[in-house]
Amino acid sequence: MRRAGPLLIIAIGLIALFIDFFPNAAVPGGDPDAGGWRQLETKLGLDLEGGLRVEYLAQAVDGQSPDAAALGVIRDIVEDRVNSTGVSEPVVQTQGADRIVVELPGVTNPDQIRRLVGQTGRVDFVPLGSTQMTEGQAIDLEQFPPLFPGSEVSSVNIGQDQTGGLTVNFQLKEEGARLFADYTRDNVGNYFAIVLDGNVISAPVINSSIPNGQVQIEAGGIGGFPIEDARNLVNVIKFGSLPFPIVELSAEQISATLGEQFLYQSLLAGAIGIGLVMLFMLVYYRLPGLIASFALVYYGIVVLAIFRLIPVTLTLAGIAGFVLSVGMAVDANILIFERMKEELRAGKSLPAAVEAGFNRAWNSILDSNVSSLITATILYLFGTSVIRGFALVLIIGVLVSMFSAIVVTRTIMRVIVRQDWARKASLFGLREGEFAAQGATRPAGRREARARV
Amino acid sequence: MFDIIGKRRYLYIFSLILTIPGLVLILLTPFTDLGLQFSIDYTGGTRWVIRFEDRDVTPEQVKSVFTEAGLASTVIPEANDYLEIRTEQVVGLREGPAATPTPAPGASASPAASASPAASASPTPTPAPSASASPGSSPAPSEPPAIPPVGNSEIPTDGQLGQIAATLQDRFGPIESQTALTSIGGVVSNDLIRDTIILIAVGSLGIMLWMTYRFRDIRFGATALVSLLHDVLVVVGLFALLGTIAGIQIDALFVTAMLTVIGFSVHDTIVVYDRVRENRARHAGEPFDEIVNHSILQTVGRSITTSMTVVITLLALLLFGGAAINNFLIALIIGIVSGTYSSIFVAAPLLVDWHLWEDRRHGRMAASRGPRVRRATP
């Protein structure tokens, strides 16, 4: 460790610097669609970036609660619905046994999205015979029994007719295709309806018999469907049916400008706080304080790199957690340096005092950090998402701070105390008298002799 | 030598004075309007922060619109002419669809059956959509353009809050901007109060076990636990007081602050106890109370220094950061200061009392009060 220490520290520092500042750096493990590489970036939470966060509860149906697989299906459907709106970087996650959390940074039309996502969507294909119906009309499914449900659709997309107008095309599965073929054969000129939760979404007239389950819906006017209508219809047909209905448990909307302001302010405040701590360390502990400050910068670089690697989503509370962990990182150094001073006053030589400082303070530092880890881990395991973010920041902070405040500081101290220029009481915030022991263990003559070489 | 342990009776009294008023207010919370004030994170409800183009719209005017809608609300002016509206009724969530069972579509539903001449003659839709067999290889247009946002679309339009927003804009002119809109249903909230209590209990217990394990002595763990609970009481009590007199609420982050305080305030206790353990081995035979007193004096400087550096960083966040997490930061700062205090003035004295009590019980009084032999210490 003594030999490998400096190399290891430099290597980790360089890797962290690369991760922090090299533009467009990527790591394996991203979305397969994007080539399996994930771009490294500092992820910001909604409170710093602005956006919409909605938590949904998947409701039990007939006393049966959704299982993990069903929740996964709901998640996928919700994600598809969200993606269809063109929002960038949506996050859709399951949480607990029956929750779905949707996070959309920077959305500007939250109501529209919530309307789309929240639809329970039981889709039915209903034969209407000669009855005409309009969009949005409620339909009595007792009177018009559905022919088959939306699950009989295997694929749906937006197409074009001969004149370039937009159409909605879908392909039916075997059973649906057979039923539809029978119906359309006998009912050319009559109507059928696509029904969502008992409301007619579209009620086209049947132009021709459809034998193969390949259906095209045209708008009838010039230019076909407006793009929004076509998309809506596609979404309804495609993602219409959730196995369990979902209801909103909570919704949070934060404006992007406010988020930006918070980000700027908290970064500034964090910088001021850390700057003040460094200043204090320099004034109070002198040379060791300088080394601790350097270790703090190193700590910051490594922690940021880990945030970008995992990635950790930074929130306001997360930044507070980071700043707090900086305070803790310094605490370890304070305990070590105080102990070092004690040992120096007790007459130990500088290198011996340094070693004793680290060794004797180790117990307290370990116990303290484990205590923080215990509570942070509890928060991480049982907290809600905002709390988990804070806890993760704290956990990473505590672990890295043990490395930076102990290994990094110690390695540098070991190198420095061997230098002659470093052996001065004032550099350690001590009076000359308290440092006198130094002279006793190392004869002045030898020091001068070395200096001359 | 300054005798802290000898004055421990006064310290206990001081800590009681510090914690009892808060405790009373906390206990009053469930029964009265006094005590802790919970934010919508706990109670459920809606919080909405908006600014009208007309900066002279008053909180009372806004409140009256909510009252007309049958909603009890609190409207507070905020910085930069923003108005913060809070209501404990949930108005910003979409109503869940009623789980109406739809008749299962049977394959037996023949097309002929539905062709009955229904009375519901509806107006003909124009243009009428039509369905036809699509050519199998119909090319889908490549990714259509995204729907552009329209107007100030962040202002709600749906549901009850949408209606209220419309009424507000009718009466007082356009809402210029909205910085935050949070709605929380009751289901989330009930979980949270229970979780908060459990998390604090589990956290404290975890620390106690860890301390007991590391010092191989239940007395170290138990007294550390008491000093932790002291800190929790100080912070929660302070917020009960602030809630009573200033309406300051505690939110979901509060539990985070409490657990962080629990994890952090034990740091100073550890430093003192570690020194007690070391001194006890070094100065075996000295009375325990003197060892503890000596240990406190040796470590009090660094206890204060370590807390001070953390408080400095948090104070910087409090003074220069955004206001959003100020309550969280205040809870942390108070908890950390209290943690340092309780390590020195609660945990260590309790440790001494417990020790002396056991000594008395085992009748070893005479031995420990015997002639004091002091080793030469620097």
Image (cartoon, grey):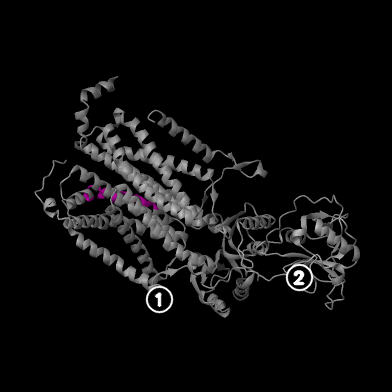
In this view of the protein, which residue sits in the foreground, A299 or B41?
A: B41
Q: CA distance from mark 1 to mark 2?
A: 49 Å
Q: Chain of mark 1?
A: B
| Number of numbered discs overlaid on the protein picture | 2
Left/right placement of residue B339 relative to residue B155 reads left
- Residue placed under numbered mark 1 in the picture: B31
Q: Chain of mark 2?
A: A
* Residue A206 quadrant: bottom right
Highlighted range, magenta: B296-313
Determine the residue positioned at 52% across, 37% down.
A18
Residue A349 versus residue A125 in the image, above or below: above
Q: Main secondary structure of the magenta part?
A: helix
Determine the residue positioned at 28% across, 20% down.
A452
Element type at marker 2?
Answer: loop
Give, as a three-letter code, the residue at label 2.
Answer: Gly
Element type at marker 1?
Answer: loop
In this view of the protein, which residue sits in the foreground, B159 or A261?
A: B159
* Residue A67 quadrant: bottom right
Give, as a three-letter code, the residue at label 1.
Answer: Phe
